[in-house]
Image: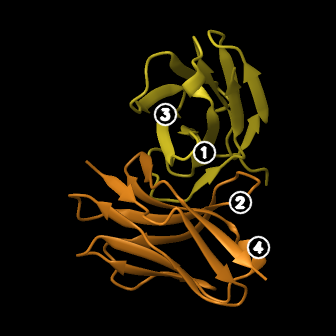
Amino acid sequence: AQTVTQSQPEMSVQEAETVTLSCTYDTSESDYYLFWYKQPPSRQMILVIRQEAYKQQNATENRFSVNFQKAAKSFSLKISDSQLGDAAMYFCAYSLADKLIFGTGTRLQVFP
Amino acid sequence: EAGVTQSPTHLIKTRGQQATLRCSPISGHTSVYWYQQALGLGLQFLLWYDEGEERNRGNFPPRFSGRQFPNYSSELNVNALELEDSALYLCASSLVPGHMNTEAFFGQGTRLTVV
């Protein structure tokens, strides 16, 4: 069965510093997609970054980048130059055809 | 362009009652997905509708049901409410039906509280 594990229920970071959120997943598929979603207090899920499993190059979106280790089934999110607005729940997700499999989330706090 | 919209924002029901939640996808999206986010858990896939038909459902009992209208908006109905149904219900739509590999756009959810 496909599962997504986020082992850090909470993380904190100082403004302007860098933080890394961890995610591991389990799948027998060879071609799939991985995502990081952000859920601020407004509750709306916002796509942060997406990685296609067949691409070896790690995806980047401005201050957000991933470390994708396919053999280890690891997909961590690095946030550089953290800002107060980055405070939110972050969910790692795996795409299985018509559904997304989500982890249980990591709450990120950003301190000034 | 309007995003995915959900109503109501909050809903309080008594155990045993029925709840109806509504969702309008982004214009041009024909697929609507429903997810349940219970406290402390990640999102759990509930249902997928496309072109008016239920295409797939997650591991939820039959009292969770819904429908999709000709304008592609959707309703989620939860019958015989139980306390553990209290959760945030999120709706999403995607550009390519049945393929969450493309970006899935989410609404802001309906917070259902069962008392």
The image quadrant that residue A7 belongs to is: bottom left
The reply to whether dot 4 and dot 2 touch (C-beta < 8 Å) is no
The reply to whether dot 3 and dot 2 touch (C-beta < 8 Å) is no
Q: Can residue B112 be seen by looking at this rendering?
A: yes
Work out how far the residue at label 2 is from the one at label 1, CA to CA, in angstroms.
16 Å
Mark 4: amino acid: Gly
Residue position marked by numbered label 2 in the rendering? A40
Mark nearer the viewer, 1 or 3: 3
**Quadrant including the C terminus of chain B:** top right
Work out how far the residue at label 1 is from the one at label 3, CA to CA, in angstroms.
11 Å
Work out how far the residue at label 3 is from the one at label 4, CA to CA, in angstroms.
30 Å
Write down which chain is painted orange.
Answer: A
The reply to whether dot 1 and dot 3 touch (C-beta < 8 Å) is no
Locate residue A55 relative to residue A21 in the image: left or right.
left
Count of residue discs:
4
- Mark 3 lies on a secondary structure that is strand
Residue A41 disc label? none
Locate residue B70 relative to residue A66 in the image: left or right.
right
Q: Chain B, which colour?
A: yellow
Locate residue A110 relative to residue B79 in the image: left or right.
right
Work out how far the residue at label 4 is from the one at label 2, CA to CA, in angstroms.
9 Å
Q: Can residue B8 be seen by looking at this rendering?
A: no
Mark 3: amino acid: Leu
Mark nearer the viewer, 3 or 2: 2
Is residue A55 placed above or below A35 in the rendered structure? below
Residue position marked by numbered label 3 in the rendering? B46
The chain ID associated with circle 4 is A
Residue A2: horizontal and vertical position, in percent?
A: 30, 51
Mark 3 nearby-residue class (10 Å; few <14, some 14–19, many ≥20): many
- Mark 2 lies on a secondary structure that is loop
